[in-house]
Amino acid sequence: MDNQPPLIISSFDLERIEQLMASNAYRNLPGIDALQNELGRATVVAPEEIPPGVITMNSAVRFVDEVSNTEYGMTLAYPGPSNAPDAVSILAPVGSALLGLSVGQSISWQGPGGRPLKLRILDVTYQPEANGEFHL
């Protein structure tokens, strides 16, 4: 994780993610420490102050893994069985890497099984805050 771009997250997302991480079901998952580190270094703002183009919870995003040169389209979601097929959990390595990034930013991250990832954000195709939905 040598490349750490600045992150912006909403106070609402921070509160919900911290509650999730504190629950017994998720407390000992691999990657929780990395997610906690990301939350700790992020700039936290009110949901109404989130700039467009920043990945927040429930945002749909297009990004490329520059290691494999593969492009993806995913929606950042809370864990749960009712998620859309393209959803990635905030507790998954890719999900925790995406949170708070902006279009054009890149981050180096450790993927499943320790595989290196270098994710570059191409587009945020949907962001709740940009659509006036501040409490999703």
Image: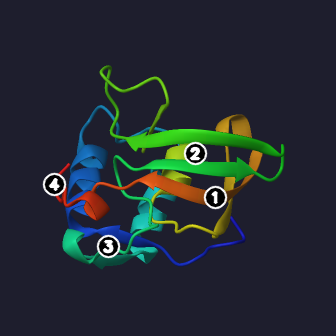
In percent of width and height, residue 103 lies at: 57, 67
Label 1, residues with CA under 10 Å away: few <14, some 14-19, many ≥20: some
Please name the residue shown 64% across and 51% down the image. Answer: 63
At mark 1, the secondary structure is strand
Residue type, label 4: His
Label 4, residues with CA under 10 Å away: few <14, some 14-19, many ≥20: few
Label 3, residues with CA under 10 Å away: few <14, some 14-19, many ≥20: many
Q: Which mark is residue 36?
A: none
Which residue carries the number 3 mark? 50
Residue type, label 1: Leu
At mark 2, the secondary structure is helix
Vertical position of residue 87 compared to residue 109: above or below = above
Q: Nearer the viewer, residue 113 or 98?
A: 98
- The disc, 4 or 2, on the residue closer to the chain's N-terminal end is 2
In percent of width and height, residue 130 lies at: 30, 63
Image position of 91 (left or right of 17): right
